[in-house]
Image (tube, rainbow, N blue to C red):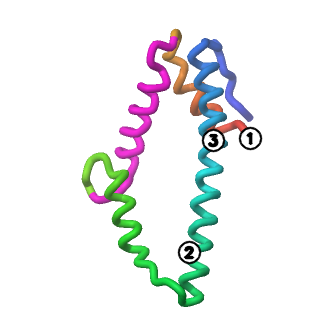
Amino acid sequence: MKPAMGKLTFGTLVGYCSGVAAKKVGKAVAAAIGFGFIALQGIAYAGYIDIDWKKVKDDAVKKIDTNADGKFDVEDAKTYWQKVKKILTNSVPDASGFSLGFLYAVTYSN
């Protein structure tokens, strides 16, 4: 059962719409990365290339690790969320409900 939205503000509405868009883009990006991995792994399995997946992982983590602790964790995700939220709520009236709408859409929309 979905929770009641309560007071619907402009911030909540644009947060919800942004969440729906982010979820769809996220799925597309995940699919592209998945297809890329499948293709590379198939080519590697056939013996055409060698891939150092540990180096790939280490380099990827180094790029997204905001607190330089050597891993991507909840603290890094919080940092990225704060940056994204600051950009998306800049000058938006009633922006206090943005997070509620965004997270509701990411969690419950199709």
Q: Name the one closer to the observer, 95 or 91.
A: 91
Q: Residue at x 69, y 37 (%)?
A: 108
Q: Name the one closer to the observer, 18 or 108.
A: 18
* Magenta residues, start to end: 70-92
Q: Residue at x 69, y 23 (%)?
A: 4
Mark 2 / mark 3, whichever is N-terminal = 3
Secondary structure of residue under mark 3: helix
Question: Which residue sits furthest left?
Answer: 68
Labelled disc at residue 96? none
Picture coordinates of residue 25, whole percent (x, y): 62, 43
Q: Is residue 32 left or right of residue 62?
A: right
Residue denoted by label 2? 40
- Residue 33 lies in quadrant: bottom right
How packed mark 2 is, by other alpha carbons closer than 10 Å (few <14, some 14-19, many 20 or more), is some
In the rendered structure, which amino acid carries the disc numbered 1? Answer: Asn
- Circle 2/circle 3 CB separation < 8 Å: no
Question: Which residue sits furthest top?
Answer: 93
Mark 2 / mark 1, whichever is N-terminal = 2
Residue denoted by label 3? 23
- Circle 2/circle 1 CB separation < 8 Å: no
Question: Which residue sits furthest front?
Answer: 48
Mark 1 / mark 3, whichever is N-terminal = 3
Does residue 31 sit above or below 55 in this rendering?
above
Residue denoted by label 1? 110
- Circle 1/circle 3 CB separation < 8 Å: no
In the rendered structure, which amino acid carries the disc numbered 2? Answer: Leu
Q: Is residue 95 magenta?
A: no
Secondary structure of residue under mark 1: loop
In front: mark 2 or mark 1?
Answer: 2
Q: Name the one closer to the observer, 35 or 61.
A: 35
Q: Residue at x 57, y 69 (%)?
A: 37
Picture coordinates of residue 11, whole percent (x, y): 56, 16
